[in-house]
Image (cartoon, rainbow, N blue to C red):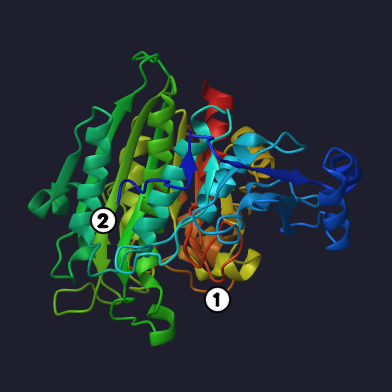
Amino acid sequence: MLDQPFDSLTTDATGALPLHAVRPEGLEALLATLPTATAAFARASGFAAKPQELVLLPGQDGLAGALLGLGQDRSPWAFGGLSSRLPEGSVWQLQQGDYDASDATLGYCLGTYRYAAFKPSERKAARLVAPAVGPEAVSHAGAIAMVRDLINAPANILGPVELGDIAAGLAARHGSSATIVEGLALDAEYPTVAAVGRGSVRPARVVSFRWQGSGATDASPLVSLCGKGVCFDTGGYDLKPSSGMLRMKKDMGGAATVLGLSRMIMEADLPIRLVTRIGCVENSVSGSAMRPLDVIRTRSGLTVEIGNTDAEGRLVLCDLLHDASAESPALLLDCATLTGAARVAVGPDLPVLFCTDDAWAEILLRNGTAVHDPMWRLPLWSGYDDWLKSPIADLNNVSSRPQAGAIVAALFLKRFVSANVPWAHLDLYAWNDLSRPGRPEGGEAQSLRAVFRAIGERLC
């Protein structure tokens, strides 16, 4: 699952047909450069350069080229629908135009993505001659495909052990050795992760690795990433209904996201230090599973009353955050498919950002907009802190009130982060409910490119 080759890219331009990507305001100027008969055909077809509009141009020997409409879409997704619409097995070369070549490459590659572990694609994709851009676009496409593969993998194939092994494999690829904590050591070092995983026959584990860029020193900024890796979530004794359980193989989307981000950072060889931690568990029902109103002690020493066993993600993360916070990183970021409340608030396409540092929040939001990988900030409203009170423990894992679920979950996590550490928490959906150009239905990598660019701007 670490690699999905992009066979749709080629460096051989032999026999490649010209592909013109054009906006409405540039259409007439482009048509004026084409042969008279070709331009007349494009006009007669009604081509107006609207987004995703495509017309194949005839020639004496068959196809002479194609026109792709961009409209005013400047995102990579403007090129995301091409591979399935161009003739099977054909080869194309983008011509110069009013677009970003890196975005075009990224969008085209992501448009070819299919989860093909069990059902290979029946169609051979059209190939694109790779534009003369840096390696970043292909690197990012590979990382995003890896994240999608991880989230799309069925839970019987990708459990806690398998997820941890993939993290270790990624670390090894970049010269790092992963640390795996499991068994009795997990009970001692990450007791809340152990408590969540105790109900499953598949053992829980925490996997971490450290990496340092070739241009980094021991004094270089430290970025610490934490991911929720719940490989399947039944809800525990507070059992989800069948409709709510249907997509719960994606509940490890936070771990997949931080692994994808780690991969992008390491492949770019950013001059920073990186530590990645993921909690790999399955939240199941059994005689050994945690129960409502159980009390567990966290790594920090705080005790937590279990108000709801289906609020397990914050338990997986709290020990990881406390561990990471002790190293005083320049940025501590966690990613999790944490609350349905975040989706109710902003829908599936906008990850919710909570952040204790306004400068980091501004950089993350701005770069999300710039690279068309957006997020939306919600407040860490301290007035709701009391909603986590417990009569017998330091705090409850859920609120005593039904409102502001995403905020209250973030406030729970904030208890485990040192006040002097810049902390950002991303509450993700990590899924596409419907297929769109470049974004097929299924697992999705959200906020990767935004965070990568923000780290590069602030720390490199």
Q: Is residue 364 visible?
A: no
Decide: few, some or many residues near mark 2? Use Cα within 10 Å; few <14, some 14-19, many ≥20: many
Q: Is residue 69 left or right of residue 293?
A: right
**Residue named by callout 2:** 280
**Residue named by callout 1:** 402
Q: Which secondary structure lies at badge 1?
A: loop
The answer to which quarter of the image holds residue 42 is: bottom right
Q: Is residue 255 visible?
A: yes
Q: Position of residue 399 (x, y in %)?
A: 48, 69
The tag earlier along the polypeptide, 2 or 1, is: 2
Q: Position of residue 218 (x, y in %)?
A: 34, 15
The answer to which quarter of the image holds residue 82 is: bottom right
Q: Nearer the viewer, mark 2 or mark 1?
A: 2
Q: Position of residue 180 (x, y in %)?
A: 16, 44
Q: Is residue 451 above or below residue 46?
A: above
Q: What residue occupies the far left of the structure in this picture?
A: 184
Name the one closer to the observer, 264 or 16: 16
The mark tally for this picture is: 2
The answer to which quarter of the image holds residue 173 is: top left
Q: Is residue 161 above or below residue 288?
A: above
